[in-house]
Image: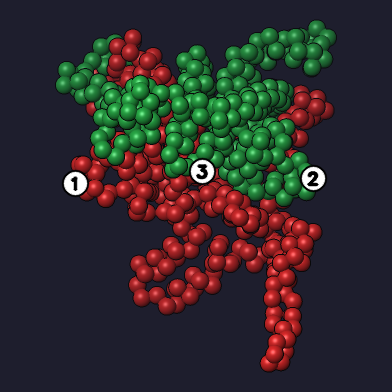
Amino acid sequence: MPHRTFFWFILPSLAAMFLFIALPIVSVAFQSLFIEHEQVLIEVENCGPFGCETETVVDNEATAAKREAEPLGRFNGLGTYFDRGHLATAEVSEAWSTRESLGGFLGEVMNLPFYRAMAFTLTYTFVCTPVLILLGLAVALGVNGLPRAFKGPTIFVSLLPMIITPLIGSLILFWMIDAEGIFGKTLQVIFDDPELSLKASPSLTWITLIVYGIWSSTPFAFVVFYAGLQTVPEDTLEAAMVDGASRWERIRYVVIPHLMPLVVFITLIQLMDNFRVFEPIIGFSAQANASSLSSIIYDDLRGDIARFNSAAATSMLTIIGVAILLTPVLIRTWRDFNRKRA
Amino acid sequence: MASGAMKRSPALAAFATGFVILWVIVASFPFLWTLWGSFKVQGDFFSKADWTNAIWGTRTIVETGGAFTTNGYSGAWIEQEFWRATMNTFIVVFFTVIISLTFGTLGGYALARSGFRYAFWLLMIALVFRAMPHITLVSGYLLPFFEWNVWGHLPTSIIVLVAINQPFTLWMLHSFFLNIPKDLDESAMVDGCTRFQAFRHVIIPVMWPGVVTTGLFSFLLAYNDFAVTAMLLSQENQTMIPKIASFLGSTFEEGNVMFAVAAVVSATAPLFVLILFFQRQIVSGLTAGAVKG
């Protein structure tokens, strides 16, 4: 296709992506270099019966006017990146030099908002992904053995947790695990502890969120594996059986190698999707105990005073994280592409 | 695979069936429970005394006289004006899907037919854009949109959702068009069609299966979105999902939770119908990218 024709065909799509994905990234980078104006201070003289004294007070009107006039704020360079809300270099090195043990140091670092969010995001990503792949494979093997008439309805039901709006799905579970909801109540009875609440402690909240993540993404792995199982070569399986391979050996040495490319595909998609975990934290009202990179950006933007610059700096750090996560994939695709051309 | 090669022992078959039944319960029970509970009063939905109250509706009978009540629904739809949010959602989703597919088919077709290296680079950039958390982009929109006075309107979030949708749409339709033989449009061009005429008269009539599948996923993205619509729409233009989130802001006043429950069930219904009719397309769409690698 000539360049000219290609250009006209791709123009609308390219323009949309350029204006609303590429430019916003530039806008985020730009905003992250600024910081909101400081409060305007004025000196007033207070004269009372015992003489006059000068006092420094905040001029709220002037502050508001200045912030209104220049919403971007004043130039701050990379300052925002290294402040307490982000990379917190000063606090980290302080904690390192005064550390008593490695655990104490880590505990100190985990109190910093950015590292807390980072820890949750990575834990969530790297726990959910392998578990849901194994679970999806197990469900696919099970469903594949069902009589034909049951397969359709089973797949229908299995799709529900994935198709459901993430915020709605997490709300539904949130109401059930409430201390007065059916799961919360049952757990209290099982552990014989009327005070037990899944929302109370950070570790229980983390577990709840991870369980939600597995619940909502297993169907995706299941559907992909199920489709893959339909194309397992029959001849190879029969040959393996003639050679005396047990059922387990047939799965291990024929079915699983056949599904390997699918595992790579699911891992890639799930790493991308789990890294941006956001809605469950809002749905479970879990900000106090767990925060992800996306949710701290949301909180910055949603607060009483929107902190655009802080949100922008976190966004830039998140984008860098995504880039690191994607590098191996991009390199692989690049090699494949070159091999195909050669 | 249904043949003798995969015959199982009875014990294994029983175990596998049991596992599938367990999964079906895990996947469906929360929905059934919430659907049932949405017709009760809050005292039953969250029962302090006894969880079986939610099944028999003990408090519901005391408070309303019947075992079922539609108070949650009337409260959400009429009192809290959930119908307005539903209409907004319909507008946003409808236009997002139409515009996404129009842009996407043109772009995906071009990418599939261009042999040049830059087509590959565009696809790679689209993959990176696909992985971008939406909220990072939103923090880039807010200040400029405030400055230009376009914040809060439905068209703004429609165009933003279209853009966020493009990377995925391009990938999906690109791989779909690769499967339509090149000879088809090229023979039309030999007969004197321009590229666009060939697209219009030869490709468009055969592209519908791929477009429907891609459209389903565009629909889901627009319908399920929270980050963009919650941040970019003003109060009166809110769509369903941010509206439900805002019910919760004012919650734990008696009854208000039930509005949210009713709204949640209402918002789930269209998705349910969607799977009912398009299960096959959803499954084939999910696997399209995977099986072809």
**Where is residue A255 drawn, in percent x and y?**
34, 25
**Type of amino acid under label 3:** Ser
**Type of amino acid under label 2:** Trp
Q: Are marks 3 and 2 on the same chain?
A: yes
Chain letter for the residue marked with disc 1 in the picture: A
Judging by the rendered image, the residue that carries numbered circle 1 is A192
| Crowd class of label 3 (few under 14; some 14 to 19; many from 20; radius 10 Å) | few
What chain is colored green? Answer: B
| Crowd class of label 1 (few under 14; some 14 to 19; many from 20; radius 10 Å) | few
Left or right of A68? Residue B236 is left
**Where is residue B147 drawn, in percent x and y?**
78, 48
Res. B119 in view: no
Q: Quadrant of residue B2?
A: top left
Q: Quadrant of residue B101?
A: top right
Residue B85 lies, with reference to residue A281, above or below; the image says above
At x 56%, y 32%, the residue is B80
Residue A219 lies, with reference to residue B242, above or below; the image says above
Q: Nearer the viewer, residue A128 or A84?
A: A84
**Where is residue A200 drawn, in percent x and y?**
35, 52
Tag count: 3
Q: Chain A is shown in which shade? A: red
Viewer-side label of 1, 2 = 1
| Crowd class of label 2 (few under 14; some 14 to 19; many from 20; radius 10 Å) | few
